[in-house]
Image: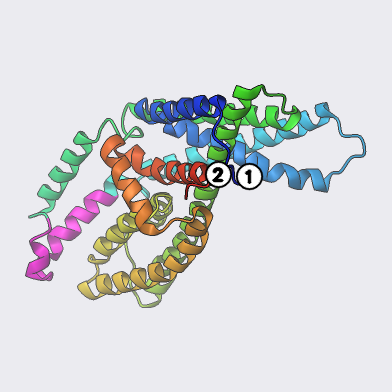
Amino acid sequence: MSKTLKSPPSVYEIAAWTLTALALFLVLKFHLLPAVIAGLFVFELVHIITPHIARRFPTKKPSNRAKLWAVGILVTIIVGLLAFASAALTAFLRSDAGSVTVLLAKMAQILDDSRKVLPIWLLEHLPADASTFKAQAADWLRSHADELQVVGKEAGRATAHVLIGMVVGGLVAVRDATQKDSYKPFARALATRGEMFGDAFRRIVFAQLRISAINTVFTGIYLAIVLPMFGVHLPLVKTMIAITFLVGLIPVLGNLISNTMIVIISLSQSLMVAVASLVYLVVIHKLEYFLNARIVGGQIRANAWELLIAMLLMEAIFGIAGIIAAPIYYAYIKSELRARDLV
């Protein structure tokens, strides 16, 4: 973190702030968030790995050309692996074994079959039957069709944006690693905004990746090991584990989505299994609160309620994309405010 700035902002900084704010707004307005996240992910990953490679293969006469080749190969490997992982995950979720459609249909049927054993006060908040559940889900998907860019005809466009974003992020990483900083005043101010936003992205996204991975491991242990030890075999376990990791990338809200899904699927066995699943997940997430506070809260010095408010406001304005972008944008804004000694 750069040292605190207390002098009045220059005209270059004011112009850079204005342009950055406009760019961040347009990213959400024109649905470019997948490209930005993919590009920043590749860029930050290259910057994290490059120093380790440099230390492992030191040279007395560093050459820009050699460095260019090294970083270029690294970028190619990273982009290739990310593209392969994305394609593999998409193929799994579209297959019969991991289909989200099959999961939703199963949840609807379980809710319908479980109405006889659930308490009356809970039934009042559930759909009347499986058909109603499916109709409500279909209505929700239709009302959010513009926001769910990975559904239907938008899937190809979103995939293209992600691939282009990764390539652009890789090219910028190559340029940044092999050329010296020779910016003019305005370009320097704008580059500083980019560095601060990239730093906010790295702190939030990589921290959330660690949290989601830990949450997925504990959830996977429960679904694939603990329950089978007691003779309980839930359907679509692999799908639930994959979805738990994906939605876990969304702070706070992701846990609510995955927990609801697992508890409903647990009802297919019995009400006691559903209660046991709920208790296990609540205990695990209570323990994770300390981890979240240490990883995310410590990174941006923000409490859970701050992130929730930011997510609510961004969702109201930009929809689902706003929820995903809110923690990153909020971390960047706090970085700017701290740099001016305002918070």
Residue 337, image x, y percentages: 49, 44
As drawn, 276 above or below 66: below
Snapshot quadrant of residue 222: bottom left
Total numbered labels placed on residues in the image: 2
Percent position of residue 209, x then y = 50, 52
Question: In this rendering, does residue 312 appear at all?
Answer: yes
User: Is residue 121 shown in magenta?
Assistant: yes
Rendered residue at 50%/28% (across/down): 14
- The amino acid sitting under disc 1 is Ser
C-alpha separation, residue under disc 2 versus residue under disc 1: 7 Å
| Element type where label 2 sits in the image | helix
Q: Which residue position is annotated with label 2?
A: 339
Q: Which mark is residue 2?
A: 1
Is 72 placed above or below 216 here?
Answer: above
Q: Residue 257 magenta-drawn?
A: no
Asked whether disc 2 touches disc 1, contact meaning CB atoms under 8 Å apart, the reply is yes
- Would you call the spot at circle 2 few (<14 residues within 10 Å), some (14-19), or many (20 or more)? some
- Please state which of residues 126 and 311 is positioned toward the viewer in this rendering: 311
- Expressed as whole percent of the image width and height from the top left, the position of residue 133 reads 14, 49
Mainly helix, strand or loop, the magenta region? helix
Residue 156 visible (yes or no): no
Q: Position of residue 249 (x, y in %)?
A: 43, 50
User: Earlier along the polypeptide chain: callout 2 or callout 1?
Assistant: 1
Residue 281 sits in which quadrant?
A: bottom left
Magenta span covers which residues? 103-126
Residue at 68 percent across and 24 percent down: it is: 183
